[in-house]
Image: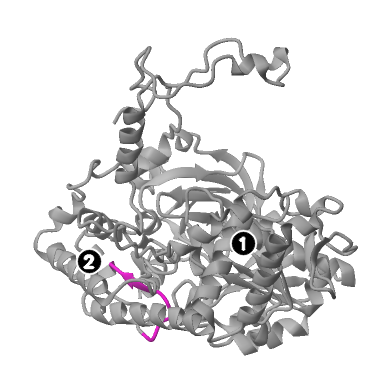
Amino acid sequence: MKTIFEQSVAGREGCWPCEGAAEESYIPKELLRGGEAGLPSVSELDVVRHFTRLSQRNYSVDSNFYPLGSCTMKYNPKFTEVVAGLPGFTRLHPVLPQLRGAGGLCQGALEVMYEIEQLLCEITGMAAYTMHPMAGAHGELTGVMLMAAYHRDKGNKKTKIIVPDSAHGTNPASAATAGYEVVSVESKDGIVDPAALEKVLDDEVAGMMMTCPNTLGLFERNLPEVVRMLRKVDALLYYDGANLNAIMGKMRVGDVGFDIVHWNVHKTLATPHGGGGPGSGPVGVSDRLVDFLPISRVRKREDGRFFLDYDCPKSIGYVAPFYGNFGVYLKAYAYVLRLGGTGLRRASENAVLAANYMRKRLSGHFEVPYDRICMHEFVASASPQAKDGVHALDFAKGLLDRGYHAPTIYFPLIVPEALMIEPTETENKETLDKFCDDLIELAELAKTNPEALTSAPVNLPVTRLDETRAARSMELTDDL
Amino acid sequence: MIPEDLLYAKTHEWVLIEGDVATVGITQFAQEQLGDLTFVEMPEVGDTFEAGTEMGSVESVKAASEIYAPVSGEVIEINEELEDAPEKVNEEPYGSGWIVKFRIKGDPEGLLDAQGYASAVESEAH
C-alpha cells in the first residue's frame, strides 16, 4: 500500500487555503516558512480512500471479538462520545478555572471533575482521588511517589517495594523509576503466599503492589493476611486497577485495606484504548495519604460552587499539565452514571461469567493450569500441543486467519505456552461459542495437520512475519 | 542432551570449570523456553559478581529473563560475537553461544551435576 506522500502528483489539489493568509497573519516575518510545505498533492477523494483503507486494515472491537487477556477490550458505548463532544466541554479553555473571576464560566466542567472523584471513591472505598495521571502507568508512578511522600513525611527509611511474580511488568518498572529496589515474591497455587511474603518482608519495605484478581485471573484469597503483615512494618498496599473490571460492586479495595489504587479507565470505564492515548489513570488514596495528592485539587464551597485548590503544602506537586485528560474521564463519568451501581455490578458479573464459560468449554482441549473458578479472565496453555511442535504463537496466528484478534500469549511468564483469554462482558454467547468452536477446531488441526497451523496466517494481507528478525534488526523509519 | 562434563545452576546457567576459569552460558532448556533470542545483555570485563546475583539478561520476542552468576568472581572475557549474533545462543548454547568467562573466587557452591539438573528441569516442567 502506498503512503499518502507516494500518491502525490504535482498540481493535484483537494482544498484551497485562503489566498494571502500568511501576509496578513500576526506571525513575525522571520518565522514564516520560506519554501513549500511539503504536503502531498492529492484530491479529497484520494484522501478519503487512503484513510478508509487504512482503517479497514486496522482491527478493532467494533469489527470483531478481541479477547486480548489483561487488556479488557470491551465495547465502548458510543453515547460517551456524544457527551464528550458537547460544545460546552469542547470549547472550554483549560486555563479558565485559574483566571480571576473566570471560574464561573466553567462550573459544569469543575463539577464533572468533582463528581467523578466522588463516584470513584464510592466504587473503590477510597478517601480521595486525583484525576491528573494521563494513563495507567503514569497513575502507577504517581501512586508510588505518593507512597514515598508518606514515608518521607513520617521519617521512615524505606528502600524496597515487593511485587508478586505474577505482576504486570509496569509494576516493577514504576517502582524502579521511583527509585525503589524491586523484590519479587513467589506465588503458590497462582496466588500470593504469605509464607513466601514473610521471607522478603522487613522494615525497609515501603509497600507492595498487587493486582486482584491477579494476572492469572485468580482472586487473591490471602489479602487480609497480606494487609496484616504489611501494616506491621508500616508498608503500604498498592492496588493495580488493571483488573478492576472483575470486581466492581463486589469488593471495595479501600475496605480490604489498600492504601493506593489506580484505574485504567480505558479498560474498566470504557474509554478508547490504544493508539498511544489519550488515556487516563486516576489514583485514589486512603485517609493517611490524602495530603500528598498532586495539585490542583477540585473543591466545593459551601455555596455549592467549585474551585481549584493549589494550597496543598504536603502535595507531591504537579504530575500533569492542567487537570489530566479531561475529555477521557468525562467519558468515564458518563459511563458510570449511565450504568449506575447495578449496571457496574452486572458488568463485572457478566465479565466473570463469560470467562468461566469459556474456561469450561476449552478445558478439555487445552491445558488449564489453574482450573478453578476464575474471575474476568483465564490462562490456558498450549503445553500439550507444544510437545508436537504447535505452540501458543501458532494458535494465535491461526485465530488471526479466522478473523479474531489473538489472545495475549506467553504472558503471564509463570505459565509456559500461555494463552490468556479475556472475553469481557460486552460479548454475547453466540460470539463466545463461535470463538470456542474455532479454537477447539484449531486444537484438532494441531493433531491432524500441524503444518496448517505453523504456517498460518494465510488469509491476511501479510502472512507469517519473522518476529525475531524484526526485533534483531529494528528499522522503524522509512524515507518518505 | 545435558552434557555430563558441565555443572549447572537451578536458574539454568551452565558452567565449565577449567582451573580457576569458569565459562558460563545458558542451557538448552533455557534457550528452548525463551525461543529465538533478540538480545543478550552482558556484563563488562572487570565486573565482579557474587554467585547467585544478576549479571545480565537475555531477551526474546516472548520475554526477557535474567542471567545469574553461577560462581563468584571477576569477568575476564565476554562473548562479543553475541552482540551481533544472539542466535548463537539458540544454535549452540553449550558451544559458540557461551556468554562470559569468570576468574573464580573461592570454591563454587550449590551447583548441580547433569543428573541433578535434569531432575530440576523435570520438576519445573510439572
Of the 4 image quadrants, the one containing the C terminus of chain B is bottom left
Residue, x 50% and y 34% (percent of image)? B80
Is residue A359 depicted above or below A267 in this figure? below
Residue, x 52% and y 48% (percent of image)? A276
Marks 1/2 in contact by CB < 8 Å: the verdict is no
Is residue B20 depicted above or below B84 in this figure? below
Q: Which residue is mark 2?
A: A385
Pick the front one: B64 or A218: A218
Pick the front one: A214 or B20: A214
Which of disc 2 and disc 1 is earlier in sequence? 1
Give SS at disc 1: loop
| Residue kind at label 2, given as amino acid type | Gln
Q: Which residues, given as a range, are shown in magenta?
A: A372-382
Q: Residue A281 has which mark?
A: 1
- Residue A362 shown in magenta: no
Is residue A466 depicted above or below A103 in this figure? above
